[in-house]
Image (spheres, grey):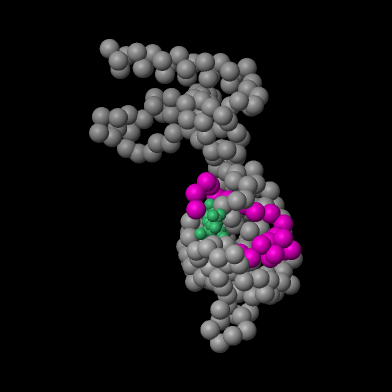
Amino acid sequence: MRIDVVTIFPQMFKAVEDCGMSRVAIERGHLELGLWDPRDYAEDNYRRIDDRPYGGGPGMVMQAPQLSRALRAAKLEADGKVVYLSPQGQTLTQEKVRELAGGPALVLLTGRYEGIDQRVLDAEVDEEISIGDYVVAGGELPAMVLIEAMVRCLPGVLGNNESIDAESFSNGLLDWPHYTRPEEFEGRSVPSELLGGNHDKIRRWRLKQALGQTWLRRPDLLKDKYLSDEEVSLLREFKIQTSEQGQESSQ
Ligand code: SAM
């Protein structure tokens, strides 16, 4: 997949190029990253890309001509959908990550200051995506969040392809708890179901925990989810065990 990012801070993307799974994805040819600095498309010696807002008020606005030229140069390289990272966009979900990671190319537009001249957004942007209901200073970190989430979905990037399907949100449930050695840590033991290698017992324990954790922490995810007979009965068991544990701890 090719991802082009329009940003006035291309150096921030060293983190994507040099670290973790995205570095490996680039090295193995799963990901190609292009960076486009609107300052390179400014026409004055100061490489200016912002100006005061029409109508007054605080802050600066990123100017349309420089931004449009940078965006169009990026699109010439790989004609992907243009996504503007914006607090006013649709909140990012795992489903959206998978959808975007399924395309051959994507152009990410990142803002700074008060944002970008609306005319660029009207003319050039296909979709706006937010990473949550809060405001950060620029679109670079949101773009990196999206890139890292997409990279994990690219075929061949994750060593074990199973792990992505078992993760939080992939099947509409949160993940189950994980344990590794030592078996005993400061008086806390690994659940007995995970020891002894009984695959069906392990599968049922994990499914019960995933259902239970979702019910406890994100009941909204269960609202419209179809549950099989086995899932209904595992969730019932989880609820009974949780209420028994609650009664024990209040005695
Ligand atoms: N004036 C804007 C508003 O109130 O909606 C906030 C602008 S913000 C300081 C500057 C840039 O950061 C935005 O243009 C956008 O690219 C990025 N940004 C900030 N919060 C974001 C979020 N939650 N999701 C995605 N991008 C965000």
Span of residues in magenta: 116-135
Asked if one can make out residue 3 in the rendered structure from this viewpoint, the answer is no
Could you say where residue 19 lies in the image, as x and y percent from the top left? 47, 62
Q: Would you identify the image quadrant in which residue 34 lies? A: bottom right
Tell me what residue is drawn at x 62 percent, y 17 percent.
229
Question: Foreground: 108 or 245?
Answer: 108
Could you say where residue 184 lies in the image, as x and y percent from the top left? 29, 32
**Which of the four quarters of the rendered structure image does ligand 1 lie in?**
bottom right
Q: Note whether 172 is above or below 223 in the view shown.
A: below
Residue 80 shown left or right of residue 190 in the figure: right
Tell me what residue is drawn at x 59 percent, y 55 percent.
86
Please check the rendered image and state whether residue 126 is part of the magenta-colored stretch, yes or no.
yes
Quadrant containing the N terminus in the rendered view: bottom right
Q: Note whether 27 is above or below 89 in the view shown.
A: below
- Can you name the residue that lies furthest to the front here? 55
Tell me what residue is drawn at x 39 percent, y 24 percent.
192
